[in-house]
Structure formats: structure tokens, C-alpha cells
Image (cartoon, helix red, strand yellow):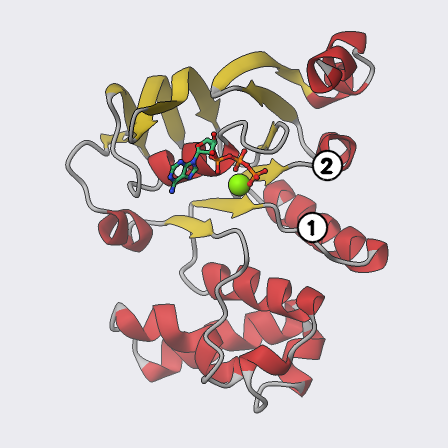
Amino acid sequence: MIHAKNLCANIGANQVLRDISLDLAPGEMLAVIGANGAGKTSLLRALSGLLPLESGAITFDGQSTDKVQAHQLARAGLIHVPQGRQIIPGLSVRDNLAIGATNIGLSQSVIAQRMQEQWQRFPVLEKRQKISGSSLSGGEQQMLAIARGLMMQPKVLMLDEPSLGLAPQIVQLIMTTLRGLADQGLAILLVEQVAMLALEYADRALVLRNGACAMQGPAKELLNSRELVNSYLS
Ligand SMILES: Nc1ncnc2c1ncn2[C@@H]1O[C@H](COP(=O)(O)OP(=O)(O)OP(=O)(O)O)[C@@H](O)[C@H]1O
Ligand SMILES: [Mg+2]
């Protein structure tokens, strides 16, 4: 679904991505882990067309993303659930859920049908559909951000630190939901600062350090790796 080769990108004079390569197949969950400032968000932004590349190449679903704008990639099924969730405070839960699908011109009946799927996945959102998105708890807002992405029927779902600031029980619910989506064939790229959590659910992982790939491999192997611990501590 995604094939990225030798990505380099800068923010101002700062090189934030250094020669990153990754592949993501349907049904696979790839975790991108790394400390504060390692470049995780920058990598997601580069993949979704929001951060221009200095060099390197990305293909999504077999097509080069060079010169394709972020909103076109989203429409084609590359969905980015951003850090901080970006729920629109003035809109109801229901309208927040529909907004992406409405913007791309889907019919009301298709939107209604896709909404039903999301209500089934996250029943608490159906119960609270009429209240303002900003009145939801942090966990509910994260569910809404994920559900909003799923309304676009993505081929790839990329999430930036979905567990941030949430209670352990909610984190478990969200991770289990994501694992279930991957098992049904969705390609998931999960950015996490909490490495152990991500490795528990992901198939493979890439460890970022100073914008470069410090390690890459099966999640189970990294979970038992002394090198991983060292790369976090050093
Ligand atoms: N808008 C910006 N202007 C200048 N430098 C930035 C900007 N955004 C990020 N950076 C720098 O780019 C590097 C990578 O940041 P990035 O946000 O990608 O890291 P991260 O791994 O997502 O961190 P976090 O865990 O804190 O979210 C850091 O050195 C950061 O200071
Ligand atoms: Mg980040």
C-alpha cells in the first residue's frame, strides 16, 4: 500500500527525516516509535503530502505521490488522524463525523450507512451524537477522530499518538479496535511514543532517532531487544 524509499525532509535548517525507507502492506500494522522530537510526526506528514520531501520517493497504492496534494491523497484513501485529534469544537459529534465524507461529496444515504458502521464500532459516539465534539472526553474524541477517518473508507490509516493522555482502559479499547481493523485488511501506520504499547499490537516496527531509522523489525523481536532499550535511553 505504501512504499517509501530514502525519504529526506527539512523543516527550516533542521533535517527532520534522514534516509527513511518503509513498506506497509494491506492487513499490516507498522508502528513508528521514538522519543520526543525523533521525527515521528514529520514522517507521517511527509507520507500524507503535508511536508515536502528534500529527496526520496513514495508510492501509495502503486502510484507515485510526487506532486499529488494532501487532499487528493486523502480522497484516494490515505488517511491521517493527526496528533491532538483536531475535533471541531463548534460542531456536534455527528457533524464532526460526517464532515470529511460531506466535503468529498458523498451522498446522504452513503454517509448515513457509513455512520451506522461507526456507531456500531463506537456505541458511545452514537449516544452522544448531538452534543458538541468538544464536550467529549479525551478518549471519546480519539474514537471520533478514528471514526471520522474510517468514514472515508481508507486503504491506509495513519495515526499520530492515539494513546496520548488517555486512561489505560480506553487505550486498550482503541488499540484492540485498530488491531481488529488491520486483521480485516486495513493497512495501519501507528505512531507512538509509548514503545511497549505499540509493540504489543503491531506486526512490525521502525524506531526513529534524530530523524533516522535506528532499528526496524518484527514487533515481537523488538519487544525483547536490549538494543531497543539502549536506543531509547541513550
Ligand atoms: N514547526 C516546526 N518548526 C521547526 N522545527 C520543528 C517544527 N516541527 C517540528 N520541528 C522539529 O523537527 C524535529 C522532529 O519533530 P517531530 O514533531 O516530527 O517529532 P515527533 O517524534 O513527532 O515528536 P513528539 O513525540 O514530541 O510528537 C524536532 O527536532 C522538532 O523540534
Ligand atoms: Mg509528534
Looking at the image, which is closer to me, 169 or 3?
Answer: 169
State left or right for residue 122 relative to residue 50: right
Residue at position x 31%, y 26% from top? 10
Q: Is the residue under label 2 in contact with that under label 1 (CB below 8 Å)? A: yes
Residue that numbered label 2 is attached to = 194
State left or right for residue 183 relative to residue 230: left
Percent across and percent down for residue 196 are 78, 31
State left or right for residue 118 relative to residue 2: right
Residue found at the very far left of the displayed protein: 67
Q: For ligand 1, tell me if the residue under mark 1 lies within 8 Å.
A: no
Q: Quadrant of residue 132?
A: bottom right
Residue at position x 68%, y 44% from top? 179
**From the viewer's perspective, is residue 45 above or below residue 224?**
below
Query: What crowding class fits label 1: few (fewer than 14 Cα within 10 Å), some (14-19), or many (20 or more)?
Result: many
Residue that numbered label 1 is attached to = 163
**From the viewer's perspective, is residue 111 above or below residue 217?**
below
State left or right for residue 66 relative to residue 131: left
Looking at the image, which is closer to me, 145 or 24?
Answer: 145
Looking at the image, which is closer to me, 1 or 216?
Answer: 216
- Cα distance between the residues tagged 1 and 2: 8 Å
Quadrant position of the N terminus in the picture: top left
**From the viewer's perspective, is residue 20 above or below residue 152?**
above
Quadrant position of the C terminus in the picture: top right
Q: Which disc number belongs to residue 31?
A: none
SS at mark 1 in the image: loop
Residue at position x 74%, y 8% from top? 227
Percent across and percent down for residue 147 are 54, 65
